[in-house]
Image (tube, rainbow, N blue to C red):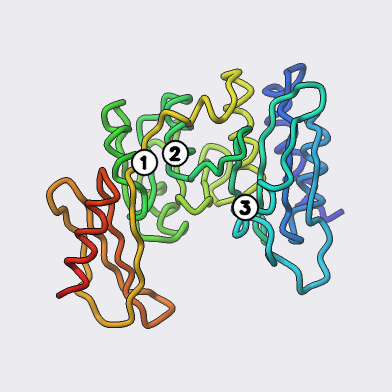
Amino acid sequence: MDKNLKIWIDLLVNKFTPVFKGKNLPHIYADFANGSGTAVAMDVFGRLGFKVTAFNTETDGKNINVDCGATHPEFLKSKMTAGPGGHPLVGISFDGDADRCIVIDETGKVVTGDVLMAALCLTSNAKTLISTIMFNSGTQKFLEQKGVELVRTKVGDRFIVEAIKQLDNISNIIAGEPSGHYVFPEIFLSGDGLLSALMILKMIVETGKPLNQLCGDIPMWPSILKNVTHEVESGEYWKGDARVLIRKSGTERLWRILVEAPTQKQCQEILDDILKK
């Protein structure tokens, strides 16, 4: 085994053994997207005492992320059944390069990154959440009522890391993108899907509550994301109690229009108004 890889595995095992040892651990359903993270994750999960039902663990160089993994969480949803011995369930879908994970609760519901980060804030008493301009505004308002400040960055985990580095104190903060890239700077200043999974499992084990109970009451506003090929004036603004974000794609000749509001009807009306201009 590569020396650096062994160091990383041993670090994770040593860090999380005190958290999980002797506890009633969730049964993990894991989709590895036929990618790079299988061997390391299975080693770490096994040494920490987790039972894992694994899918898409073999790559042929062409099947990475194909109809599976974080970009297709519906695959794992279709596979999750009652855990052995009455253990609670949690589903974790990694992407091919294993820096991202999407989580599925025990009811088979995909937990959005916005809600998951909010739950991590509330259960760890974090007072600062660093996320991107895509973070849901309804969840933001909920967190602000709980005393948690949201710091927004541009889209991209590198901007998350830059914002972390600007802080005087990086302890007790949560950071990440709603897409499933999370950063835990007290342990590692980069996104890692396995570390993210372990931090989420830590939350479940330490609270003694399943994900649906931890996340079920955290609100998200309805939203509509529309891509258009004609130029639209970029910017971010509020229209009443609705938030509008328009940005030009960095990779395609597209303009992405995001509308968030307390109701789906408001979202659609505002989007229709934008498209008429």
* N-term-proximal mark, 3 vs 1: 3
Q: Residue at x 22, y 72 (%)?
A: 275
Q: How many marks?
A: 3
* N-term-proximal mark, 3 vs 2: 3
Mark 3 and mark 2: Cα distance apart in space? 16 Å
Q: Report the residue that reaches farthest toward the front.
A: 265
Task: Specify the quadrant that holds the C terminus.
Answer: bottom left
**Tags 3 and 2 touching, CB below 8 Å:** no
**In this image, 142 relative to 124: left or right?**
left
Label disc, if present, on residue 73 of the rendered structure: 3
Residue position marked by numbered label 2 in the rendering: 115
**Tags 2 and 1 touching, CB below 8 Å:** yes
Front residue of 228 and 26: 228
199 lies above or below 20: below
85 lies above or below 274: above
The local crowd at label 3, few if under 14, some if 14 to 19, many if 20 or more residues have their Cα within 10 Å, is many
Q: Secondary structure at mark 1?
A: loop
Mark 2 and mark 1: Cα distance apart in space? 7 Å
| Quarter of the figure with residue 140 | top left
66 lies above or below 5: below
Tell me where residue 209 appears, x and y as whole percent.
58, 21
Q: Secondary structure at mark 3?
A: loop
Q: Nearer the viewer, mark 2 or mark 1?
A: 1
Looking at the rendered structure, the kind of residue marked 3 is Pro
The local crowd at label 2, few if under 14, some if 14 to 19, many if 20 or more residues have their Cα within 10 Å, is many
149 lies above or below 76: above
Tell me where residue 174 appears, x and y as whole percent.
45, 38
Residue position marked by numbered label 1 in the rendering: 220
Q: Residue at x 33, y 53 (%)?
A: 223
Looking at the rendered structure, the kind of residue marked 2 is Val
| Quarter of the figure with residue 134 | bottom left
Q: Residue at x 35, y 39 (%)?
A: 168
